[in-house]
Image: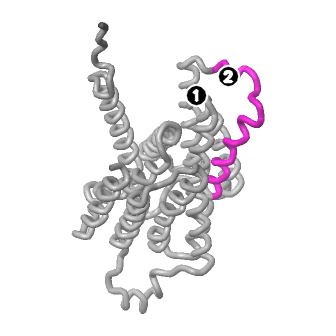
Amino acid sequence: MIVIQNVGPSSPVRIRRLWTKRILWGVLFGLMVLIYGSHAPLITLTKVDGQVPFNPSSCVVMIELSKLLISVATLVLTGGTSALHAPPPLGRVAPYAVPAVLYAVNNNLVVLMQAYMDPSSYQVLSNLKIASTALLYSLCLGKRLRPSQWLALGLLMGAGVCHSYNSLDLGDHERAEAEEGPRLYITVWGLFLVLVYCCVSGLAAVYTERVLKSQKLPLSLQNFYLYGFGVAINGLSSFSFVAGEKSFLEGYSGVVWAIIAGQAANGLLMSVVLKHGSGITRLFVISCSMLVNALLSWAILGLQLTPIFLLPVSMIGLAAYLYYR
């Protein structure tokens, strides 16, 4: 009789591989949360006399260009350049233009919305993109979520609203209204734009995940297509609308280049999550990054945290338990 040992579901090799995979995903998740959370504090550090000294549109182009160059380098190192020797079929490449268009639309919506609401209202209402992403994820990708998972996503959205509301400056409201007029406001048009922004944000994430998973291509090649369109579309937008404001690289400092490097790395890491994981993980990254943002703002910028800060922390922790249990 031949006895084969250690091949069952509880074999040491299988357990070791499982733990290695969990550790790698944990490191990936931690890096993304750290980069996302440090974005706003780093931008604050670049400000001169309260103003951002660089061209935000050019920064987006440089982020997309960085991701494109890294994708090309990865193709070269992995020997995947043979796929670029001949023009690819249009049907294979065209779907990658859609996310670039959607993200470009959203970037412009963020700017447009500021005219119809105050920044604090935008900060609170933008958390609705968690709900829109979850709904589109379920409808478009056919992923059925358990009731406990829907509850978890609801807690994530509630944690975002709670954290945003805690960040509002509601000091002497009556005096502020007498001196400066209403500080918190939103028009009907502004509310409509917020809903469009949240739907487009969710659609971009879900569509990108669908494209990356539906085509059996190396991720580096898919990134090459995706960020090639990103550079082209955002480049056209940058040079068309902001040519008269600042020169392309005006105001760039070491911190700005750090922002570009971080956001480029985060975009590439997110493509790994969408290709091999789930877009819902992106929502947890964004929610956890709010907490990192608050902690870094406290440590670097001297902003004060209140006891209410513990509420969104608890809500996010409970949401993670309910969703992944």
Spot occupied by residue 145 in the image (x, y as percentages of width and height): 47, 55
Residue in the image at 42% along x and 89% along y: 177
Q: Nearer the viewer, mark 1 or mark 2?
A: 1
Is residue 18 positioned above or below 296 on the image?
Answer: above
Q: In the rendered image of this protein, does residue 64 appear above or below residue 105?
A: above
Residue that badge 2 annotates: 83
The reply to whether residue 227 is in sight is no
Of the numbered discs in the image, which one, if any, rests on residue 154? none
Q: Which residues are magenta?
A: 81-105
**Residue at 54%, 31% in the rendered image:** 70
Above or below for 103 versus 24 = below
- Badge 1 element: loop
- The answer for how far apart the CA atoms under marks 1 and 2 are is 10 Å
Q: Earlier in the sequence, mark 1 or mark 2?
A: 2
User: Which disc is residue 218 wearing?
Assistant: 1
Say which quarter of the image contains residue 232. Answer: top right
Q: Residues within 10 Å of mark 1 (few under 14, many from 20)?
A: few
Q: Tag 2, which secondary structure?
A: helix
Asked whether residue 61 appears in the rendered view, the answer is yes
Residue at 58%, 24% in the rendered image? 75
Q: Residue at x 46, y 80 (%)?
A: 184
User: What secondary structure predominates along the stretch shown in magenta?
Assistant: helix
Q: Amino acid at mark 2?
A: Ala
Residue 138 drawn in magenta: no
